[in-house]
Image (cartoon, rainbow, N blue to C red):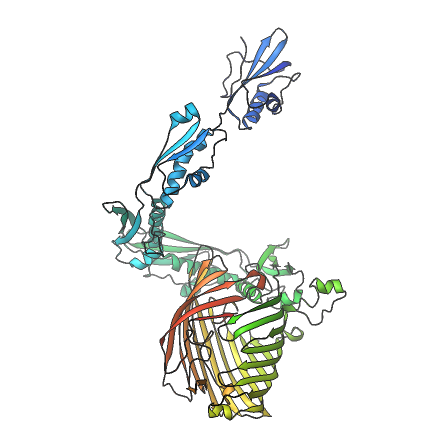
């Protein structure tokens, strides 16, 4: 009896023994696929030695062509010796793809969903899976009752795949109702749900059952995080008679909110357990919530991390008690051993000098590894603007020496040189041209060794200094400026800045021209506190007065000189200079005009404070941030009109024109000696990490003297975005509407700016 090996792995009762020489290989059943192509997949050929294992391998390779529904390789004994018979059943070609009953989607859309088209070889599994794929597409679009049928008979007889679709009505969620949520508000739970109720033009409210199932899990998880460990969450669907409207009922059985009956520490030797417990949010009698647990675990890790225990493991263990709603919590700590710093290595700074990175670290070899200092150093390095966002990482690397780890500083340089050519319409300055060259990683001592080095952009780079040339001709404003600053002069804690400028502005009833320079010095007193001293020297020319102008303008007509000395303190605990999300900034200064001579003598006092809170953080790490700002300013003495306080426009009171708020005469802004501003802004991510939205409330006033007789307010919304080509500099577009104004205040709905404004 002849032996056979089949595709399904079955063998004849008397298998052909291995080792026989094959004299013929015969392919049968192929019409579309050439014999040569089939034989090309086989290792067994005429003259080869037969083995069942080799047959199995050849079967897999022939099947791998994707051309056959069945393959059989059968050995046969004949007069000449052993022959190998290869029988194949070719897959048929799909002759047609048809859809019936589809109105919401075109045939083309559905075919793309299937990934199948006429002329392809028939893949019955893929075609059958298409039923669920089409249903999923409809359900994603709100067609909850859709059903799809595949005509298997037509597919088998005529090789035509016909899908018959019963779409049903499109279902929109009109209401989401919570029942049994006695301890958590409906608003809190709604925020955790993907399912949203329909709102014309803004929220489609399409019903998706899979999405709702995820919402049930999300609501339950939120309850568990709040300490309701026994919570049960279900849902009920109530459709309108025509099945187009849906009320979703979320049924909650909260159960008890668990509280901590006792709190214990285990494994703590480096610190006193009572010392850690005093800093913990969890305590006997407090609710057992995920937030409290996370905060306490993080606090313990930070506490250990500050003294070099970077491998500490913290694990809370919960024991349910016989008392309902009570748990005993034991915080188990595995301290590990302290680690000190070995070498500090820097990678990725191709052009930036090592010292620019090292001066932001504030830790040194042989010190204990301090995780809090590492976090601060990462924020400082990111805040320099010299490196790609999220590219800064400081990682301890184990060494062969016990208790010693090298610190690897990884950075990725961003483009710090920008040449901008453009023109536009500014909400504060009219039509304005712009030619600017900025290098935020400048090095005044790095002269090029060749022309090629200069044109490659590798000269004058790497010291973290800033050099800028700005040329801005315009219809209402002309501004030409050269700036230079060094945050660490000669690698010290002292900073230096300078600016030479020419400024020509068309005001309401006169022209104002300024030519001068400024020099600034700073000193870092401690990590978040700095003192500064600024010197100013300007020539101001007030000319081309209108026929009727206020006396305040006539008093300063012509050329005059102004000098001033300003001293102040700045405290900054924020986590980022351009995109702060935590901490505060507080700046106070006193500026004395006339201290170095000049035409005017007065004293200006200013205080500016800003506070930031992270409200939420999504799964991508994007933050929603609440920020508040207050600014007070007062001038003692007789300040000229061009040195007074003004308000209105971007960075001040949005919804009002630039200098559109405050005392006026003959339609000319006079400014004031007293300024008070208070604002709040809520920002939230929209797309990726480059586009965010904001909602804001701006309030404030400008008064002639130190008093409050009027108050303005505006509300609005806007967007913030960054353009990678220009580096990490935010662009701001805002739309504001005054809700409280006074007298002849000038309104302006739209305003925009480049750079941080809040």
Q: Give whichever of 192, 24 is nearer the camera.
A: 24
Q: Residue furthest left?
A: 241
Q: Where residue 5 appears, x then y in whole percent?
A: 53, 17
Please determine whether, in this image, residue 108 is positioned above or below residue 640: above
Farthest front residue? Answer: 547
Image-based side of 125 in relation to 358, left or right: left
Q: Quadrant of residue 559?
A: bottom right
Is residue 121 depicted above or below 404 in this figure?
A: above
User: Residue 668: x and y, percent?
Assistant: 45, 85
Q: How many marks?
A: 0
Q: Where residue 656 sits: x, y (%)?
A: 42, 76
Q: Is residue 191 left or right of residue 501?
A: left
Rendered location of residue 521, percent (x, y): 60, 80
Does the rendering let one see residue 156?
yes
In the picture, measured across the screen, residue 496 lies left or right of residue 231, that is right
For residue 579, say whether it is visible.
no
Which of these two is toward me, 3 or 80? 80
**Nearer to us in this view, 264 or 228:** 228
Vertical placement of 721 versus 102: above or below? below
Residue drawn at point x = 33 percent, y = 59 percent:
287
Q: Residue most toward the right?
A: 450
């Amino acid at each position: 009896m002849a032996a056979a090996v089949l595709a399904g792995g079955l063998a004849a009762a008397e298998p052909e023994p291995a080792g026989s020489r094959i004299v013929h290989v015969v392919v049968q059943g192929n019409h579309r696929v050439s014999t040569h192509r089939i034989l090309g997949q086989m290792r067994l050929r005429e003259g080869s030695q037969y083995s069942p294992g080799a047959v199995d391998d050849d079967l897999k390779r022939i099947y791998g062509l994707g051309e056959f529904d069945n393959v059989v390789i059968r050995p046969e004994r004949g007069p000449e010796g052993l022959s190998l018979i290869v029988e194949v059943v070719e897959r048929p070609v799909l002759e047609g793809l048809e859809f019936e009953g589809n109105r919401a989607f075109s045939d083309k859309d559905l075919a793309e969903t299937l990934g199948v088209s006429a002329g392809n070889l028939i893949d019955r599994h893929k075609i059958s899976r298409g039923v669920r794929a089409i249903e999923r597409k409809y359900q994603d679009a709100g067609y909850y009752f859709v059903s799809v049928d595949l005509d298997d008979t037509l597919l088998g007889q005529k090789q035509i795949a016909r899908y018959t679709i019963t779409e049903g009505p499109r279902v929109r969620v009109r209401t989401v109702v919570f029942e049994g949520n006695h301890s958590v508000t409906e608003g809190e739970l709604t925020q955790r749900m993907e399912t949203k109720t329909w709102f014309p033009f803004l929220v489609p409210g399409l019903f998706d059952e899979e999405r709702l199932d995820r919402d049930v899990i999300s609501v339950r998880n939120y309850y568990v995080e709040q300490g309701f460990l026994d919570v049960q969450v279900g849902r009920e669907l109530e459709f309108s008679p025509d099945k187009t409207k849906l009320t979703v009922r979320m049924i909650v059985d909260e159960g008890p909110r668990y509280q901590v009956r006792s709190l214990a520490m285990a494994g703590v030797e480096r610190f006193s357990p009572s010392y850690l417990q005093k800093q913990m949010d969890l305590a006997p009698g407090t609710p057992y919530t995920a937030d409290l647990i996370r905060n306490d675990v993080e606090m313990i890790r930070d506490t250990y991390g500050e003294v070099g225990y970077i491998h500490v493991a913290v694990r809370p263990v919960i024991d349910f008690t016989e008392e309902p709603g009570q748990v005993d919590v034991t915080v188990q700590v595995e301290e590990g051993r302290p680690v000190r710093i070995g070498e500090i290595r820097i990678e990725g700074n191709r052009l930036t000098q090592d010292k620019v990175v090292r001066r932001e670290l504030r830790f040194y070899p042989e010190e204990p590894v301090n995780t809090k200092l590492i976090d601060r150093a990462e924020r400082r390095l990111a805040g320099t603007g010299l490196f790609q966002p999220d590219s800064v990482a400081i990682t301890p690397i184990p060494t062969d020496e016990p208790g010693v780890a090298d610190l690897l500083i990884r950075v990725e340089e961003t483009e710090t040189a920008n040449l901008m050519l453009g023109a536009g319409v500014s909400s504060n300055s009219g039509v304005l041209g712009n030619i600017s060259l900025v290098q935020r990683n400048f090095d005044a001592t790095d002269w090029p060794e060749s022309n090629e080095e200069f044109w490659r952009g590798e000269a004058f780079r790497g010291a973290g200094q800033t050099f800028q040339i700005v040329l801005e001709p315009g219809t209402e404003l002309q501004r030409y400026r050269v700036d230079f600053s060094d945050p660490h002069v000669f690698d010290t804690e002292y900073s230096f800045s300078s600016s030479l400028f020419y400024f020509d502005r068309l005001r309401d009833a006169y022209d104002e021209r300024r030519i001068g320079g400024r020099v600034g010095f700073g000193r870092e007193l401690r990590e978040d506190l700095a003192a500064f001293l600024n010197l100013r020297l300007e020539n101001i020319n007030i000319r081309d007065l209108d026929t009727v102008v206020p006396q305040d303008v006539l008093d300063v007509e012509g050329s005059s000189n102004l000098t001033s000395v300003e001293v102040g303190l700045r405290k900054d605990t924020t986590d980022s200079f351009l995109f702060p999300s935590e901490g505060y900034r507080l700046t106070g200064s006193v500026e004395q005009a006339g201290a170095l001579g000049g035409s005017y003598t007065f004293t200006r006092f200013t205080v500016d404070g800003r506070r930031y809170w992270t409200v939420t953080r999504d799964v991508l790490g994007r933050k929603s941030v609440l920020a508040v700002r207050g600014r007070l300013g007062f001038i003692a003495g007789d300040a000229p009109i061009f040195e007074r306080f003004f308000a209105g426009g971007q960075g001040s009171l949005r919804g009002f024109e630039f200098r559109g708020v405050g005392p006026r005469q003959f339609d000319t802004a006079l400014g004031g000696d007293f300024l008070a501003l208070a604002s709040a802004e809520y920002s939230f991510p929209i797309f990726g990490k480059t586009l965010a939205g904001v909602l804001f409330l701006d309030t404030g006033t400008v008064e002639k003297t130190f008093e409050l007789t009027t108050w303005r307010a505006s509300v609005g919304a806007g967007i913030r975005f960054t353009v990678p080509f220009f580096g990490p500099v935010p662009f701001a577009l805002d739309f504001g509407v005054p809700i409280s104004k006074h007298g002849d205040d000038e309104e302006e709905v739209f305003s925009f700016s480049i750079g941080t404004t809040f």
